[in-house]
Image (cartoon, helix red, strand yellow):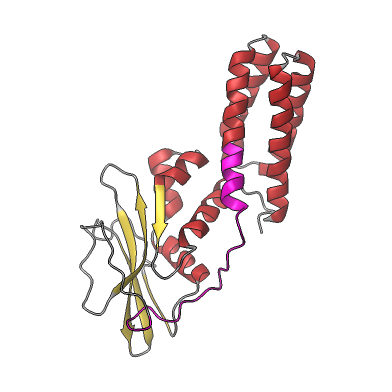
Amino acid sequence: MPEAMEQIKNLVETLETLKQAVAERNQVKSSETVTIFLHQFKGAFGHRKVVQDTFPTLEELKDHIAAGDYNTASAQVLALLAMLRSVMSTTAALPIDVSFRPQSYFWPLGPRPVPTGGESLPVRQADEVEIARIEIKSSTRDVASVYARRVPSGIHYRVVDEYDGETLTADRAGESAAPLSLGELVDFFMGAWPLMKVLETNVGEDVEQMLDFFSGSSNFYPDFDRVLRQRVVIACLGPLSWT
């Protein structure tokens, strides 16, 4: 991830230069800087869908500069800056310990979570607890959740949705001897309920809209939402150097 973050930082710096050149109505410098940004952008994001979606905007930006339409050009540059800064703020926060593992999900060692919302989720069994959930801003505020309960071999997990499992994959249940690590939980959840597919279906591949469309919460994993957001950014924008 550090290499990818450096690439995004360079893109932001180039856009800042472009913003200044556009504000000064310097056509030569603006055109040269757009060309530099185009090469940097393609180098950072390779052949991913985001490049195909963004390149027409960048070509339009070049045309507006060539035509002397600096007001429109300035608006486009500001929009690109906002998008890249959103990505940076999502991925550049303090490191996340994906190996974090709660001591227990169950009382008295674990907290007594009282989830709200998700009224159409399957009823939890008497000994089940919700350990994490993802809510999306659909018209019905859909929720998917992970339930955990004790079994003789350790802990049994199941991912549930509000549609009798219609939005889930076949990999919706599992077991472990001890509580899952944060990374294991996210892998399990996103494998059972394909968050990226859900987001793309609802808002397309606009990264900012994706990040605004969902929230993750957990009484056991404080960084659950942050990891989800990093996973979304990496899936949408990250080249092969996101490691």
Q: Residue 122 placed where, x, y %? A: 22, 65
- Residue at x 68% of width, y 19% of height: 62
Confirm whether the magenta stretch covers residue 68.
Answer: no
Question: Is 177 displayed left or right of 237 in the figure?
Answer: left
Q: Residue 238 placed where, x, y %? A: 62, 49
- Residue at x 28% of width, y 60% of height: 165
In the displayed orientation, state which residue is furthest to the bottom: 152
Q: Magenta residues, as a range?
A: 83-109
- Residue at x 28% of width, y 63% of height: 115
Question: Is 135 displayed left or right of 162 in the figure?
Answer: right
Confirm whether the magenta stretch covers residue 93.
Answer: yes
- Residue at x 57% of width, y 29% of height: 79
* Res. 2 visible in picture: yes
Question: Is 212 displayed left or right of 237 in the figure?
Answer: left
Establish if 119 lies above or below 82.
below
Q: Quadrant of residue 9?
A: top right
Give the dominant element type of the magenta stretch: helix, strand or loop. loop
Q: Residue 99 placed where, x, y %? A: 56, 73
Q: Residue 232 placed where, x, y %? A: 51, 51
Q: Tell which of 10 and 45 is nearer to you.
A: 10
In the displayed orientation, state which residue is furthest to the top: 67
Establish if 82 lies above or below 122.
above
Q: How many marks?
A: 0
Q: Quadrant of residue 77?
A: top right
* Res. 205 visible in picture: no
Q: Quadrant of residue 58?
A: top right
Establish if 121 lies above or below 240.
below
Figure quadrant of the C terminus: bottom right
Figure quadrant of the N terminus: bottom right
